[in-house]
Image (cartoon, rainbow, N blue to C red):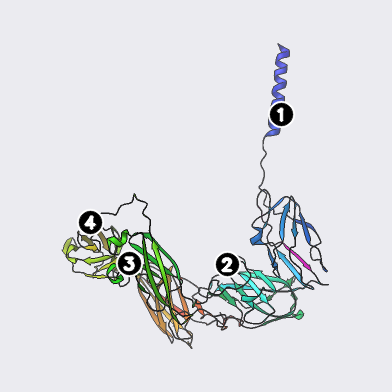
Amino acid sequence: MKKQWGIIFLGAMLFGGCAKIGTPTGGPRDVTPPRFLRSSPPNYSTNFSARKIECWFDEYLQLKDINQQLMISPPMKKKPSVTPKGKSFVLELNDTLKARTTYVMDFGNAITDNNEGNVLEGFRYVFSTGDYIDSLSVSGTVISAFDLKPPKESFLILVYNDLSDTAPSAKLPLYVGRTNASGKYRIDNMAEGQYRFYAIKDNNSNFRYDPFTEPVAFIDSVITLSPHQINTDSSGKLVPVELPPFYFFTENDTRQYIKNTNRKEPCKLEVVMNIPPKGEILYRAPSFDVHEKLIAERNHSGDSLTLWITDSLLCAADSLTLIFSYFSPADSSRKTDTVRFNYFDAGGKKQKEFLQLKTSPSRGGTVDLFAPLAITAGKPVCKTDTSKIILTETLDSVSRPRPFRFYSDSLNPRLCYVACSWQPEGRYVLNMYPGFLTTCQGYTNDSLEVSFLAQKQEFYGNIILHVGGHLTSPVIIQLYEKNLVDERYISSDTTLVFSMLKPASYSFKAIYDDNHNKLWDTGNLKKKQQPEEIELMEESLTVRSNWDIEKTWILKKRITGSKKNNK
């Protein structure tokens, strides 16, 4: 018996020991990216003639989005092949190298460790097919000309020693750089010489500027780089030449064409233009009178046209053909397009019995004192009967009918308004009865009651803005609260009052309207025309209820392109 207990005890000890050895001990998470050890040929080689490059690191790695992350300067027509091999990767060149040229291969954020995905940022492999490595560097920033913010996505910096105007669209650049999340960039290992610099959002990854479809920026003057510009900081590191900021913009597209068409509903035809047309879009049909059978709805930007069919037989047709005519600035003539609208009814979804209505404010909401109540119908309205609506006001516990003004939107046949001299803190009820709004097919609204409040007078605040700066050209002053709230046009130092503002954080923007057209004008690369300059107020202003904010803003016009920023 003692022998048996001894065996059991020994087994338990052995089992416990094994269990202890197998228990995870945990530990800190690995946050260290792979470390570069060596390469063949060595990094920064001269007289380079190899066709294959291998780089070794201190841990197993993976390459993420290598085709997007790897950027080679100068660009190669045939991209190299890159293959991971455990703790190394092999890069095979598929293009012919230029003589006496320094090449920079920037791997971006492609190299990560295999387990935790820690990124080795900005690993670069550099070599020269000549006797030396070029050593000049430049740096700078890319920001939006419209709001002075860095781009949301990476921009490419294209550098040319071909100084012709056609180079950025026709040729590959001599050097290329890439912006980071802050819009900053740096290009190293450049040779001395004269260059033109451009920045583009390279949507199709062809290292060329595609007009109208890609944002672009340029520096006005030719930049000359020479060895005497090489400087170092206190630690001995090379300091790049700081270039003027790029202010990117999208050129106005002078081409005019129909971008998209659809017929998602049997009685609804939609046409979307690439840009808002100059002049009216005309349309006709080979088989019916469009003026009798269609109602047009246009959006406020002018680039979309919705045609509502008023005839039930046309709604039931599987296919409808319309001919559109519009002016094309690029051709200085009218263009004509024939569009076929097809619709297939899958069944199951039936026409609603009543015309659906939505109001803004909705039930229980609050209407601004100087704004109308908006009513949006699900279909175009062909007939209105204001005797079928009643507006009631309750103020100081006394209810009474209130007169109102009813009107339809000039662009949208589904939108109408009820305007009234709302009394602060008044309670209102709008009753809409069947027959108030009727579609061309005879559908009308069901009974609907909407109760809402009018805002308090003391809910609003005001901004008193004193604008100075000895203006030499007209300026558009814009007020923003997420979106544009108000704008004023001034030509001299003045005081502006923005009243009845909702409590919120507001910002101001100034547009220097050099051509006096009361609009912000974008740039033109071919004409070497920078976009109209803007200035932002450095601080936002917080409007509180029943409160006035007084602010002085001295404008300091900055200079775009190759000149210094005066801000």
In the picture provided, is 332 more to the left or to the right than 171? left
> What residue lies at 30% left-to-right and 73% top-to-bottom?
410
Residue 386, horizontal then vertical, whole percent: 19, 66
What's the mark number on residue 203?
Answer: 2
Mark on residue 17?
1
Q: Secondary structure at mark 3?
A: helix
Q: Nearer the viewer, residue 383 or 358?
A: 383
Q: Please tell me whether mark 3 or mark 1 is closer to you in this view.
A: 1
Residue that numbered label 4 is attached to: 446
Q: Main secondary structure of the magenta part?
A: loop
Report helix, strand or loop for mark 4: loop
Disc 3 residue type (three-letter): Phe
Q: Position of residue 532 (x, y in %)?
A: 51, 81
Q: In whole angstroms, how far apart are the C-alphas of marks 3 and 4?
A: 35 Å
Find out whether the residues at labels 4 and 2 contact each other: C-beta distance under 8 Å.
no
Q: Amino acid at mark 1?
A: Gly
Residue hosting label 3: 459
The magenta segment: 117-131
Between the C-alphas of marks 4 and 1, the distance is 79 Å
Q: Give the SS element for disc 1.
A: helix
Query: What element does badge 2 sit on?
Result: loop
Q: Can you see residue 542?
A: no
Query: For residue 288, which numbered disc appears in the image?
Result: none
Q: Residue furthest front?
A: 287
